[in-house]
Amino acid sequence: MTEAVTETRKRSRGRDIALRIFGLILVAAVLWLLFTRLVSWSEVAAAMADLDWGDWAWLVAVSAIRIAVEPLLLMAATPGLRWPKALPGFLAPAAAASVVPGPSDLAARYAMFRSWGYSGAQTSASVILVFLYTTFAKVALPVVAALLFLAFGRSNAQLETLAVIAAGVLIGAVFLIFLLLRSEKTARRLGHAVGVAAKRVASWFRIRTPETLAADLADRAVHFRDRTGDVVRTRTHLAAGAAALAQAGLFAILLVSVRAVGIRSGDLDWVSVFAAFALVQLLTSVPITPSGLGVAEAAYVAVLTAGSSTEFAGQVAAAAIIYRLFSWVLLVPLGAVAWLWWSRTRTRSSADMREAKS
């Protein structure tokens, strides 16, 4: 048994290393194509050099507002959590996820939440709900973008098709969650049905699955219902609003970045920028590279210059880089500071408890 577990861990570690190497290669390839085929470094440097103190002040201001509203989702998904703890609870895990692709933020979040008195079940529920509401918000963005296009009398077949698919996914997901929360019996049946379907699909591709997959998924469906049911029933409106605010904060940073590099609304209005934001947010939902590094920048240049000349390609690339600096890179040092603050407060709290016992 021990040898089998060791072998499984080695394979998992090997897959993680392979994925990270693949991610680095992909980042290098995308950035090479971006700055050798689409734009030049000199154009990007010139656009960034034109920024004045007012532009930087606006970027700092909208970034500060975005960081301030991000913890609201964590608070909505975690009853009893207050903003002074939710802020480092967002920053430190976000910094980990920004550097390493995959669920690298989980260890940090679990450690912090457990030190604040939350059980493993409560922490797991919070993590699941934040992920779900964030994903739902990203999937909803193309729908909002398509509605904006219609409101302003525009038409984009690709965006409309994507919006219809996204709307279908959202409706299906909400219906599944409704079934999960309806009753324990329904949740168990649904989990079992998903397990049976997954085993059948896996067999088509000759992928081995555990014999107990259907039963395991049935149990997990019940656990999901038990852990998240109360929060979903009573705090969905708060979580949905917080997730929308988080996406609005990110879009504000992108829009200010676009305007800061000199692209006026007559050349690229906010509705087109929002459509690009919606598409890239959905594209980078799967963390192939850390926070979509390389992929997001190339996608913004491709989408924002689509259907027009590449006259603004250098400015768009500069805007994408500035946006990533304030929406992603900035979180790394702030997250490190948040982690150090938590480490010191935890150490001090543990020392106080030992003194009180003695």
Image (cartoon, rainbow, N blue to C red):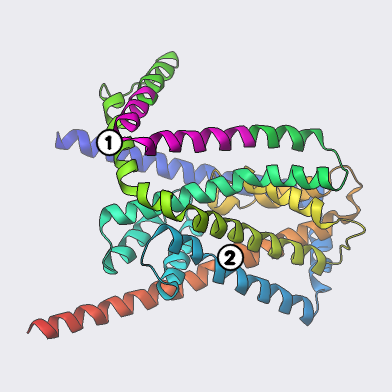
Give percent across and percent down for residue 198.
40, 23
Q: In which quarter of the image is residue 221?
A: top left
Q: Which tag is nearer the camera, tag 1 or tag 2?
A: 2
Residue at image point 45% right, 17% down: 205
Residue 32 seen by the camera: no
Q: Does the magenta stretch include residue 192?
A: yes
The C terminus, quarter of image: bottom left
Label placed on residue 262: none
Q: Is residue 300 magenta?
A: no
In front of the other: 63 or 290: 63
In front of the other: 24 or 251: 251
Q: How far apart are marks 1 and 2 (CA)?
A: 34 Å
Location of residue 229 with respect to 86 vertically, above or below: above
Name the secondary structure under disc 1.
helix
Type of secondary structure dominating the magenta stretch: helix
- Relative to residue 136, is residue 341 drawn left or right? left
Residue denoted by label 1: 8
Farthest-out residue, top: 204
- Relative to residue 299, is residue 80 drawn left or right? left
In front of the other: 69 or 40: 69
Residue 325 seen by the camera: yes
Residue denoted by label 2: 329
The three-letter amino acid code for the residue at tag 1 is Thr
Residue at image point 38% right, 36% down: 182
The three-letter amino acid code for the residue at tag 2 is Val
Name the secondary structure under disc 2.
helix
> Which numbered disc, 1 or 2, marks the residue that appears first in the sequence?
1
- Relative to residue 50, is residue 115 drawn left or right? left
Q: In which quarter of the image is residue 117?
A: bottom left
- Relative to residue 112, is residue 75 drawn left or right? right
Residue at image point 45% right, 60% down: 76
Q: What stretch is highlighted in magenta?
A: 167-193
